[in-house]
Amino acid sequence: FKDVMEGSSPPVAYEWAVRAGADPKEADVFSKLKGRDMYDYIGALLVRSDVLRLQPQIKDDTNRHIKQFIYRKRHIKVSHDAIHVHRGEDIGLDTEAKGYIDKYLEGHKYNNEETQTSTLDYIPLLHYIRYYHDMKCSENIREIFIATDDPTDVEKEITELGPKRGHAIDFNNCHKIHFTVSKVEKIFGESDCAHQYAKTIGSISDFIVARTADTFVGEFNSDWGKLIRLFRLVLNEEGGILSNMGKLGPAHRLVLSQRESAGADPSPVVLKDTKVAWGPGWQLGVI
């Protein structure tokens, strides 16, 4: 697919875009793109066209799950941020992901000086919310949804972030944060079909809430994180005809256009406010 798409002529690429829901101007922009820009642009088109959608029964079950376990008493349906805290046995099997985690732990206080081994095998929640240190203090309660396969440990970490003031945590005497944690348990080994179906519905529900967040903090080593990124892409109306892309690479342009600092070389797509917790793009701030 990759070779076919990148090797297609402009007229063929134009037709691809039209079939994905592009208008003539958008199809013309797509026909001039190369490499990663093509994937992001066609992805944003497919998401906008609602080609990737749930079956009716799955949609009904996820809506019920969201209302029962996520929205509940709080108002995160209106305005919320989301964090994806990815842990579990699958990370240990991913050499690249484990490398990022080990590198982080080595540079922080989680090493046991006597044994020279880490006291943790995952990146703590505190690292994910570090972005809020740079935000202006506010008396308003910030709603944050956490999608995770490790809700028990995450809920414990939340209690260690600061004193509780009513329904919210007072973080750094600066932000009042109300957390809602995913109800998806990490399940390994055998389980019955009903349990697996409930777990799947929970994961899809987490995805829906995360993709609509005002700000998303996550890692893009996992397929789940990459899918969230895809669904947060929108076409850039200011992209213009990008036959000459200039000096910036696609990933750098994407981040700069998100910050409104790309100048005359904007990305053809814009990524809704998204932060890299760890993994690919972590050091560069590029996703």
Image: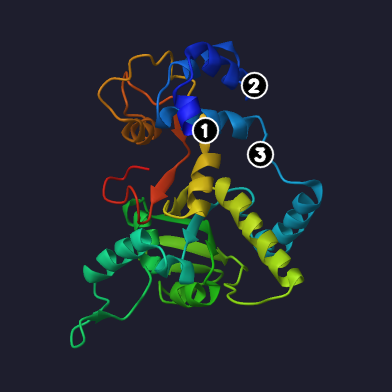
Q: Type of residue at label 1? A: Phe
Identify the mark at residue 139; answer none if there is no mark.
none
Disc tally is: 3
**Which label sits in the foreground, 1 or 3?**
1
Of 72 and 93, the residue lying toward us: 93
Q: CA distance from mark 2 to mark 3?
A: 14 Å
Residue denoted by label 1? 1
Residue 111 place in picture, x, y as percent: 24, 78
Please name the residue shown 45% across and 22% down the image: 7
Assess disc 2: are there few (<14), some (14-19) or many (≥20) residues with their C-alpha within 10 Å of its C-alpha.
some
Examine the rendering and report whether any part of residue 171 can be seen: no
Residue 213 place in picture, x, y as percent: 54, 48
Please name the residue shown 60% across and 74% down the image: 187
Of 145 and 189, the residue lying toward us: 189
Residue denoted by label 2? 19
Q: Mark 3 or mark 2, which is nearer the start of the sequence?
A: 2
Please name the residue shown 27% across and 76% down the image: 110
Residue denoted by label 3? 52
Examine the rendering and report whether any part of residue 13 can be seen: yes
Of 182 and 137, the residue lying toward us: 182
Question: In the picture provided, is 278 more to the left or to the right than 233?
Answer: left
